[in-house]
Image (spheres, coloured by chain):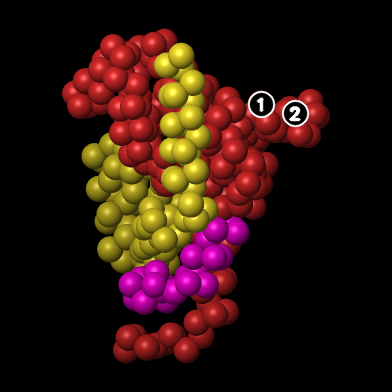
Chain colours: A red, B yellow
């Protein structure tokens, strides 16, 4: 844990309660993104994010320095999100939520030969961001959550496993599948929206 | 060992994360040198990850932070009494 973080926590617990604003600020984006990945609704995710932060404030004394503060906070957010899912959709949906990854399904990438020449141009396009957002939203829950924690919030494999209550091997498998599903989803999108780019950089086609 | 494309795809994610062992890394790199398809798959996957980590891709609702700290402020006030 960051020394600064530990110092802040100690001071908050000793009575300088306003410092909690400062403690939480670097993580507020992460909390929201965790919850939108579970709840898929902006209003609900924001409400849950507020609950998560309030809950972290109330229970700060129970935080032990053996985990990172960010992992602890993410765990609270995940629990809050799952609680709301259960409430909204009933027990049936929850069993889907907790399902194991099976071996069925095609997780191979889509072959292409012309994208690697255009990364910077492509990445600046607003349409591509939108396509990525919807592709992520449409991933099966177990894949989306791992993907968000690893590739958006940049938790490591151990931290992701800890936050989701699964083993590191499952994190790796789910992450791989999520990335391949996204790759496959976005490649045709690029091909159909940017046909004029073919050959633009002087490659023989 | 000479790897085929499918074998490379299975390890692309771990290759990006740098968690494959040295021997496998070497085999993958050897394959990438002469395989345009796998190179393009690797690059496109990497690009997706770059785009994902870009703050403009996943934005927060306008006013999110202000509302959050306002709510927190009320809670802190409450806890003082």
Q: Quadrant of the C terminus of chain A?
A: bottom left
Residue at x-position 33% and y-position 43%: B17
| Residue A21 visible here | yes
Query: What span is colored magenta in the figure?
Result: A110-135
Question: Foreground: B19 or A123?
Answer: A123
User: Which residue matches tag 1?
Assistant: A83
Residue B30 highlighted magenta (yes or no): no
Residue at x-position 35% and y-position 32%: A21
Where disc 1 sits, the SS reads: helix
Q: Quadrant of the N terminus of chain A?
A: top left
The percent position of residue A54, horizontal first and vertical second, equals 50, 26
Residue A145: image quadrant is top right
On screen, residue B44 above or below A61: below
User: Which residue matches tag 2?
Assistant: A87
Residue at x-position 35% and y-position 38%: A25
Residue at x-position 25% and y-position 17%: A11
- The answer to whether residue A97 is left or right of residue B13 is right
In contact (CB < 8 Å): disc 1 and disc 2: yes
């Amino acid at each position: 844990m960051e020394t600064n973080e530990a110092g802040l926590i100690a001071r908050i617990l000793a009575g300088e309660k306003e410092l909690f604003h400062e403690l939480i600020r670097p993580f507020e984006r992460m909390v929201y993104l965790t919850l939108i990945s579970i709840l898929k609704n902006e209003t609900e995710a924001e409400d849950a994010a507020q609950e998560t932060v309030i809950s972290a404030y109330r229970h700060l004394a129970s935080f032990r320095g053996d985990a990172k503060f960010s992992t602890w906070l993410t765990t609270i957010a995940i629990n809050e999100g799952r609680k709301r899912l259960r409430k909204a959709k009933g027990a049936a949906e929850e069993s889907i939520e907790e399902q194991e990854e099976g071996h069925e399904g095609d997780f191979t990438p889509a072959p292409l030969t012309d994208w690697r020449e255009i990364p910077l141009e492509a990445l600046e396009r607003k349409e591509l961001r939108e396509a990525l957002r919807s592709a992520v939203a449409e991933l099966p829950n177990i894949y989306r959550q791992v993907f968000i924690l690893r590739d958006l919030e940049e938790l490591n494999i151990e931290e992701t496993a800890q936050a989701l209550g699964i083993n590191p091997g499952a994190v790796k498998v789910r992450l791989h599948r999520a990335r391949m599903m996204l790759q496959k989803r976005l490649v045709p999108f690029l091909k159909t929206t940017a046909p004029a780019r073919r050959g633009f950089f002087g490659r023989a086609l | 060992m000479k790897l085929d494309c499918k074998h490379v795809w299975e390890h692309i994610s771990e290759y990006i994360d740098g968690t494959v062992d040295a021997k496998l890394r070497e085999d993958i790199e050897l394959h990438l040198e002469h395989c345009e398809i796998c190179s393009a798959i690797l690059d496109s996957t990497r690009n997706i990850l770059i785009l994902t980590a870009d703050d403009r891709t996943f934005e927060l609702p306008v006013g999110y932070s202000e509302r959050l700290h306002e709510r927190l402020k009320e809670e802190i006030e409450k806890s003082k009494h």
